Image (tube, rainbow, N blue to C red):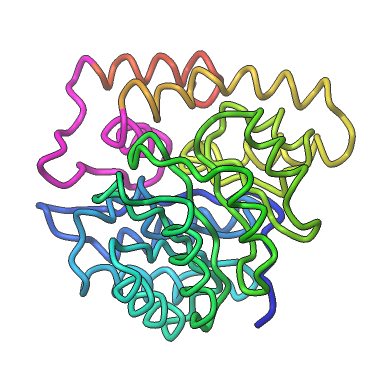
């Protein structure tokens, strides 16, 4: 089981809905457009993809659509984490059959009080033992209220079928601890664009960034500039992008991210209920933020 190429920028792509139903045609068009921006690959069925609102059938068809619409050289990572280990394995195997290169597995969290060090170690180790594709750990305490410790990540990094982690905590100190203690070939991906510059300079291999849905070229540029050692230029661009990233993550959420996509030539559309679409006032505020960042004229 070879490890996938995880060096670069990956948008955790949104799922387009028309009249509340998944629009696979719009999804394919978005994928084709993203594929021309210099990104390394795509993350499907992540938090920004509203995966918790999709049926099992929809999840599989979304993965199939993305795999068929993307170039062969792009790495496709699929969020296959479910609450039970058995269901996670089943979905992971299905995604592998559909052409996914790696599985992004969120921490089980419904029984949060029971998700001890030993429970999580066993969950991920058992899954990695049986998965036909490499596993990426996914720590997103904003939603799960569970954070994978650097010690646990270090232990899991030794498993030959666990390729890396997407850490969305926004905690640069924790990223540093993971980078220091994990195996040297373990990929650490920062899960939010706010600390992208700092994370890359510490040694992260790339980022899975909501911002890359709307400003993929800018995210790729920050990555390239850091790799080339042009840190002042990278820092300047990072600072310009921080207000946009804050808008499409913290302030306006998935609805705001989709509104920004609509403004920038992608299909965003409405989120699926019970999430509400952006109001006209919010759209006006988002448009101003995009203009100030130079993304809109």
Q: Quick check: 235 above or below 204? A: above
Point out residue 276 in the picture as x, y percentages from the top left corner: 14, 34
Q: Residue placed at 40% from the left, 53% from the top? A: 107
**On the picture, is 167 further left or further right than 22?**
right
Residue 173 occupies which quadrant of the picture?
A: top right
Residue 59 occupies which quadrant of the picture?
A: bottom left
Q: Quick check: 199 above or below 58? A: above
Please tell me which residue lies in front, 154 or 95: 154
Point out residue 71 in the picture as x, y percentages from the top left corner: 57, 71
Q: Residue placed at 65% from the left, 83% from the top? A: 1
Q: Residue placed at 63% from the left, 58% from the top? A: 164
Please tell me which residue lies in front, 117 or 42: 117
**Outermost residue to the right:** 229
Point out residue 64 in the picture as x, y percentages from the top left corner: 37, 76
Q: Quick check: 25 above or below 251? A: below
Please tell me which residue lies in front, 170 or 260: 170
- Part of the protein shown in magenta: 253-281
* Total marks in image: 0
Q: Magenta span has 279?
A: yes
Q: Quick check: 283 above or below 210? A: above
Residue 281 occupies which quadrant of the picture?
A: top left
**On the picture, is 128 further left or further right than 27?**
right
Q: Residue placed at 74% from the left, 37% from the top? A: 200
Point out residue 231 in the picture as x, y percentages from the top left corner: 84, 26
Q: Magenta span has 184?
A: no
**On the picture, is 148 further left or further right than 108?**
right
């Amino acid at each position: 089981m070879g490890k996938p190429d995880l060096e670069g920028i990956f948008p955790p792509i949104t799922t387009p809905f028309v009249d509340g139903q998944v629009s696979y045609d719009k999804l394919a068009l978005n994928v084709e457009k993203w594929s021309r921006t210099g990104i390394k690959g795509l993350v499907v069925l992540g938090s920004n993809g509203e995966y918790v609102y999709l049926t099992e059938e929809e999840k599989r068809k979304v993965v199939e659509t993305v795999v068929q619409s993307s170039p062969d050289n792009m790495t496709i990572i699929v969020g296959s984490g479910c609450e039970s280990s058995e269901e996670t394995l089943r979905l992971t195997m299905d995604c592998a059959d559909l052409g996914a290169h790696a599985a992004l597995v969120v921490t089980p969290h419904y029984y949060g009080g029971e998700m001890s060090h030993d429970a999580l170690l066993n969950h991920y180790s058992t899954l990695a033992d049986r998965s036909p594709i490499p596993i990426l750990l996914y720590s997103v305490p904003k939603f799960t209220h569970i954070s994978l410790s650097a010690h646990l990540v270090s232990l899991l990094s030794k498993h030959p079928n666990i390729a890396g982690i997407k850490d969305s905590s926004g905690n640069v100190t924790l990223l540093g601890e993971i980078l220091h203690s994990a195996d040297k070939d373990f990929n650490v991906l920062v899960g939010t664009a706010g600390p992208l510059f700092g994370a890359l300079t510490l040694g992260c291999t790339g980022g899975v960034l909501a911002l890359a849905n709307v400003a993929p070229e800018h995210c790729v540029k920050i990555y390239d500039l850091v790799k080339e050692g042009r840190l002042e230029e990278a820092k300047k661009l990072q600072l310009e992008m921080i207000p946009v990233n804050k808008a499409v993550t913290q302030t306006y959420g998935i609805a705001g991210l989709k509104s920004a996509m609509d403004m920038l030539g992608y299909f965003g559309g409405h989120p699926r209920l019970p999430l509400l679409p952006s109001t006209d006032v919010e759209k006006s505020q988002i448009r101003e933020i995009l203009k100030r960042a130079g993304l809109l004229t």
